[in-house]
Each structure stands twice: as structure tokens, then as C-alpha cells.
Image: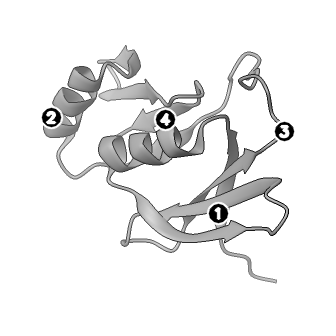
Amino acid sequence: MKSTFLHTNINVFDLNKSIQFYSEALGLHEMRRIEIPDGSFIIVYLGDTETDHLLELTWLRDRKEPYNLGDNEWHIAFHVDDRNAAFLKHQQMGCICYENKEMDLYFIADPDGYWLEIL
């Protein structure tokens, strides 16, 4: 049996804010969207146009408070083609939450507090 990655899902509190963040911070853009007739949820798939892997953002209409991510002991990793330019952009955005200079990596936090590793 062979399997391949399709997407990674995260739930977001403010869909438009999240889409804007991922577009500005990582250059992801909307690939497709699912909106059901009763409006109870919206799913937006973001992609990088280089790989088939998608980031699935799920917004739930009835959610009244931001998500509790607990210890947030997981992350999604992204490779950037120009680390210095990415670091400067993320610094200007104020979203860098941790830097490990010895390993030449850092993390940014999205509007919901999810950590994203930048390599």
C-alpha cells in the first residue's frame, strides 16, 4: 500500500484574517473553497503552487471564542527560498515567536497561535 499527503487541517477563528496572514507571510493562496448552504462552516484550501500538499482552514460559524491550543507542542514546517528575506518580512509583521540560531530556523505564529517552522 502506498499513501501520499493530501492536506493538513487547522481550525481558525477568523477565516479572512487567517487567509490574509498565510498569503502575506508565506505566499499561499486559495486553491478551492467549500461553503455549505446552511453556512455552519467554510473550508478553504491554501496551496503554494509548487507541491500538491494543501493547508485546510476550517471556520465554524458557531465558534464564539478563540481555540485553546494547549501546550501547542506541534507545528507545520515551511521551506523558504530566501531565508533572510523571509526573516525580515516576518520580523516586520511581528509574528516571529521563537528563533533557534544554532539550528538556523525560527517559528512564526499565525493569528490563532499555531506555530509555523521556517527553514
Whether residue 5 is situated above or below residue 82 in the rendered picture:
below
Residue 23 to residue 48: above or below: above
Identify the amino acid type marked 1: His
Rendering coords of residue 42 (x, y %):
71, 57
Give the amino acid at mark 4: Leu
Considering the numbered disc 1 on the image, is that residue within a helix, a strand or a loop?
strand
Front: mark 2 or 3: 3
Which marked residue is nearer to the observer: mark 4 or mark 3? 3
Q: Which residue is mark 3?
A: 62
Q: Position of residue 53 (x, y in %)?
A: 55, 67
Left or right placement of residue 84 versus residue 98 in this view: left
Q: Which mark is residue 7?
A: 1
Residue 116 tag number: 4
Please name which of the two marks, 2 or 1, marks the residue nearer to the observer: 1
Q: Which mark is residue 84?
A: 2
User: Whole-Å distance between the Cαs marked 2 and 1?
Assistant: 27 Å
Going 59% across and 35% down the picture, which residue do you hit?
A: 75
Secondary structure under tag 3 reads loop
The crowd level at tag 3 (other Cα within 10 Å; few <14, some 14-19, many 20+) is: few
